[in-house]
Image (tube, rainbow, N blue to C red):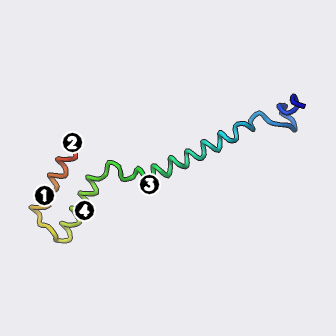
């Protein structure tokens, strides 16, 4: 009976042990996609989001052009550090 289990006929197929591995790969691909799409999205973008916020304050009239340019220079200077 053991020999028929590994036969390509009606018994146990050779690829059956690979099914859990395939599900494991599918699971980790899903986790990687979700992490890349949502969790890692904000990393490394704090300067541009700060620039966006500064631009919004300038457009809304909360700060004048001189203050906008001074703060923008500070943001861009600290980006290189």
Q: CA distance from mark 3 to mark 2?
A: 26 Å
Q: Secondary structure at mark 4?
A: helix
Picture residue at 65% right of the left edge, 41% below the top: 22
Picture residue at 36% right of the left edge, 53% below the top: 42
* Whether residue 1 is situated above or below residue 24 in the rendered picture: above
Single out the mark in the foreground, 1 or 4: 4
Q: Earlier in the sequence, mark 3 or mark 2?
A: 3
Within 10 Å of the Cα at label 2, are there few (<14), some (14-19), or many (20+) other Cα atoms?
Answer: few
Label 1 with label 4: CB-CB less than 8 Å: no
Q: Earlier in the sequence, mark 4 or mark 2?
A: 4
Single out the mark in the foreground, 1 or 3: 3
Picture residue at 85% right of the left edge, 31% below the top: 7
As drawn, which residue projects farthest toward the top?
Answer: 3
Label 4 with label 2: CB-CB less than 8 Å: no
As drawn, which residue projects farthest toward the bottom?
Answer: 61
Q: Is residue 60 left or right of residue 19?
A: left
Single out the mark in the foreground, 1 or 2: 2
Q: Which residue is mark 3?
A: 38
Measured from the top left, where is residue 21 in percent x and y?
65, 39
Q: CA distance from mark 4 to mark 2?
A: 21 Å
Q: Which residue is mark 2?
A: 81
Q: Which residue is mark 1?
A: 69
Q: CA distance from mark 1 to mark 2?
A: 19 Å
Measured from the top left, where is residue 56 in percent x and y?
23, 66
Q: Earlier in the sequence, mark 4 or mark 3?
A: 3
Measured from the top left, where is residue 4 in percent x and y?
88, 31
As drawn, which residue projects farthest toward the right?
Answer: 1
Number of callouts in the render?
A: 4
Q: Earlier in the sequence, mark 1 or mark 3?
A: 3
Q: Give me the disc on residue 53.
A: 4
Q: Earlier in the sequence, mark 1 or mark 2?
A: 1
């Amino acid at each position: 009976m053991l020999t028929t289990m590994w036969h390509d006929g009606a018994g146990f197929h050779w690829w059956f042990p690979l099914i859990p591995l395939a599900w494991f790969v599918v699971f980790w691909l899903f986790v990687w996609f979700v992490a890349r799409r949502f969790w890692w999205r904000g990393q490394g973008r704090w300067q541009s989001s700060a620039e966006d916020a500064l631009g919004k304050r300038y457009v809304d009239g909360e700060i004048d052009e001189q203050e906008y340019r001074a703060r923008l220079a500070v943001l861009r200077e600290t980006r290189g550090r």
